Image (cartoon, rainbow, N blue to C red):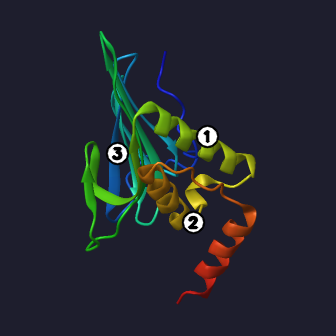
Amino acid sequence: MSAPAIHGAAGVRPSSPPGRLTEVELVWREKQIEHWIRFGHAVHEQILDRRRRVLSFPAGAVFAFVRWASNGFGTVVSRIDILRAVSAGDGYQTLPSVRPGGEILLQTSGWPSVEQVLLLIDAIEALDIDPAEAAPDYWRHVHNRLAAGDAPRSYSRQQHRAWHLRQRAEP
């Protein structure tokens, strides 16, 4: 079986665009180690071999990076990170397989939490909203609620509209 399709990567360009990009190395070894992008808009893809490729995201792009791994005894890693690609000179956090790193909006591990985030992403898509365009504050909210053991609120069209109006009002 091949790696899952990249959600939202329809605009992938065949050659590297100018400027600094955030690169994410994806690995797919069926039932051993599986890294994929759940949502986001890559601007470049480099295929390294049958099992590895690198996706590049421009500064400001928001994307979800899922990592899963198992061994003979079961799952050993199950995590999701929602990141915003940074501009040159911006501060950032480092993560495995992400160069140079990114602004972490949400970070969680363990299948119950990862599944809850995946369901929230599905719910945003059911509203016909691209999760990569959702308010970054929402992803921080989800992160904080999960870390506190509370249920996060659902994303709404009103919240999304307010986020876009706020973006237009900023200089």
Q: Could one spot residue 62 in this view of the protein?
A: no
Query: Label 2 is placed on what type of residue?
Result: Ala
Q: Which mark is residue 119?
A: 1
Q: Which mark is residue 96?
A: none
14 to the left or right of 165: left
> Tag 3's secondary structure?
strand
Query: Which residue is denoted by mark 2 in the rendering?
Result: 135
> Which is nearer the N-term, disc 3 or disc 1?
3
Q: Nearer the viewer, mark 2 or mark 1?
A: 1
Rendering coords of residue 117 (x, y %): 53, 44
Place residue 86 in its image quadrant: bottom left
Residue, x 48% and y 38% (percent of image)?
Answer: 114
Residue, x 45% and y 58% (percent of image)?
Answer: 144
Question: 151 above or below 104?
Answer: above
Query: Spatial distance from mark 3 to mark 2, Cα to Cα?
Result: 22 Å
Place residue 161 in its image quadrant: bottom right
> Are discs 3 and 1 less than 8 Å apart at CB?
no
Residue, x 68% and y 75% (percent of image)?
Answer: 162
In the picture as drawn, the residue positioned furthest to the bottom comes out as 171
> Tag 1's secondary structure?
helix
Residue, x 51% and y 61% (percent of image)?
Answer: 141
Query: Spatial distance from mark 3 to mark 1, Cα to Cα?
Result: 23 Å
In the picture as drawn, the residue positioned furthest to the front comes out as 149
Query: Which residue is denoted by mark 3 in the rendering?
Result: 24
Query: Label 3 is placed on what type of residue?
Result: Val
Rendering coords of residue 15 (x, y %): 40, 49
